[in-house]
Image (cartoon, coloured by chain):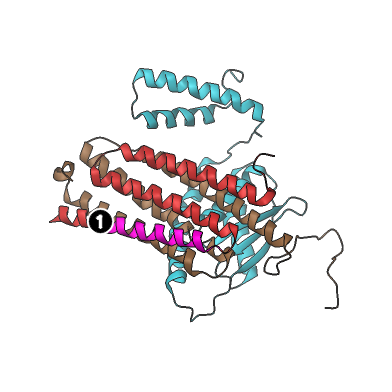
Amino acid sequence: MKRILPYPFFAAILLLAWLLLNESVSPGAVVFGAIVAVVISWIMVSLEVPRTILRRPLAAIRLAFAVLVEIVRSNNAVARIILSSNKRDRRSGFVRIPLDTRNPYSLAALACIITATPGTLWVEYDSVDNTMLLHVLDLIDEEEWVKIIKERYESRLMEIFS
Amino acid sequence: MTQAVDLPDWAALLTAFLLIVGAGLALIGSFGLLRLKNFYDRIHAPTLGTTLGIGSILIASMVFHSVTQQRFVIHELLITVLMVVTTPVTLMLLARAALFRDRLEGSDIVPPRYQSARPSDKPENQ
Amino acid sequence: MIMTLLSWSILVAQGLLGLAMLCAALRILRGPRAQDRVLGLDTLYVNAAMLLLVFGIRTGSTVYFEAALVIALLGFVATAALAKFLMRGEIIE
């Protein structure tokens, strides 16, 4: 089984993308999409992607919803910053945040979440010290951001990825 | 607009609203690209267009085409997934490239590399 | 009545997106540094993809969807390659 279909989840997503592109679920499209999905997942084997287990799918869905809410909220905040006149003294800057997780999937997910949220940007990761550099558009308190990143996202990601 | 004669009111209103919101957010983002003062501020601005901006236009497109063609047209989800995956990657690569170039030039707006293990090489009395 | 509202809002959305593309193009022209220009180009790509989706709604055809998908993909590849180039001076290491 593992030899025929090394990454079943990845292959299923590829098949789904193929069907969406073709806009049909006719047998021909399904068969051809399945062949493409299986062949591409064989190619993935030679890339040696590290394996992971999604331990708590429900927690992942809750996190995705929380991120969506946060994106809408900070879209509003950043739009206000751009449109407001420069009366208020806004300060942007870098914050160095120490991390606890070293799991590559948690780190990748954390980087994508932080960068996709307007107003915060993941700039750099230091694998020796396990710290990251965050750039914040509206920086009020450095300690506050360390707490937000660690409590809101990192602890939940550590629960999700084992 | 000849195909859209049989569009119900709610779908037309929803599409119009989402289109204006999406295009407005894209414009605010691009305007921020012009207005903000330095590169690390500016890189936050286009995120408005690439998250909620393109998101609402994609939802508008899905609603409109699904209602007018009387079937589910959801292939816009592919662009959604593509944007969700690619936007953070491009922005992170660009930010790292900018950081690298600024450090190379010895610019003082970027922090130096973090060196907790080694003793600080900054002069103490400055 | 509602249909005129929709067609007007499509026009307005196209105008807003056109202005957004103008802003991004100005940033490409102005610079001041290479990374600013690349960021402007990335924004231009995303705005172009959105404009194509609005065109799709205006004409009622789904053909524009594929063009938007291709533009979004090309924008990603172009920006990633340019960012690599800025960092190392070459794209494929």
Chain depicted in brown: B
Residue B28 percent location from the top left of the image: 41, 64
**Which three-letter amino acid code belongs to the residue tagged 1?**
Leu
Please give the chain letter of the residue carrying mark 1.
C
Residue C16 part of the magenta segment: yes
Residue placed furthest toward the front: C29
Q: Magenta span covers which residues?
A: C11-31
Indicate the secondary structure of the residue bearing disc 1. Answer: helix
Residue B46 percent location from the top left of the image: 48, 58
- Is residue B81 among the parts visible in the rendering? yes
Chain depicted in cyan: A
What residue sits 64% from the left and 33% below the top?
A51
Q: Colour of chain C?
A: red
Say which of A82 and C85 sits in front: C85
Residue C8 percent location from the top left of the image: 21, 57
- From the image, give the main secondary structure of the stretch colored magenta: helix
Is the residue marked by circle 1 packed among few (<14), some (14-19), or many (20+) residues within 10 Å? some
